[in-house]
Image (cartoon, rainbow, N blue to C red):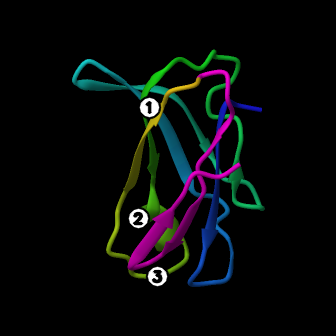
Amino acid sequence: MSAITTHVLDTSRGCPASGLKVELQVRSGTEWKTLGAGITDANGRCGTLMGEQKLQAGSYRLLFDAGSYFRDQHAETFYSEIPIVFEIARPETHYHVPLLISPFGYSTYRGS
């Protein structure tokens, strides 16, 4: 399992958001560098974003392709991408970043 994982739930449909593209990036100076990408499984989980890479302290971003996901659901949406930027202070710790989405809103929190 990756040191950074996510779980996406579609609150408008009351089910996991399966098939949603997710990209993990790390800040390098003023640029963002892609570390990995994945697609949520049938349970809305994506746990292989980093592969075998070692986590370092720094700024990270999860980028969720909400536009494509909702188009696949034949639903109009306001958000084409949802970026979640967060800080890793203790790289020895696992970081889980869940996302609750609907076509016109989203919420996130630090999971366990």
Q: Nearer the viewer, residue 90 or 56?
A: 90
| Range of residues picked out in magenta | 91-112
Callout in the foreground (1, 2): 1
Q: Earlier in the sequence, mark 3 or mark 1?
A: 1
Question: Is there CB contact under 8 Å for labels 3 and 2?
Answer: no
Q: Amino acid at mark 1?
A: Gln
Where in the figure is residue 89, as x and y percent of width and height? 50, 27
Residue under pointer 3:
75
Residue under pointer 1:
25
Q: Amino acid at mark 3?
A: Ala
Residue at the image point whose x is 63% and y is 68% from the top: 9
Residue at the image point whose x is 65% and y is 52% from the top: 111
The image's mark for residue 67 is 2
Q: Nearer the viewer, residue 59 or 65?
A: 59
Q: Amino acid at mark 2?
A: Gly
Residue at the image point whose x is 59% and y is 20% from the top: 55
SS for tag 1? Answer: strand
SS for tag 2? Answer: helix
Q: Earlier in the sequence, mark 3 or mark 2?
A: 2
Q: Nearer the viewer, residue 3 or 37?
A: 3
> In this rendering, would 61 be left or right of 7?
left
Answer above or below: position of 81 versus 85.
Answer: below
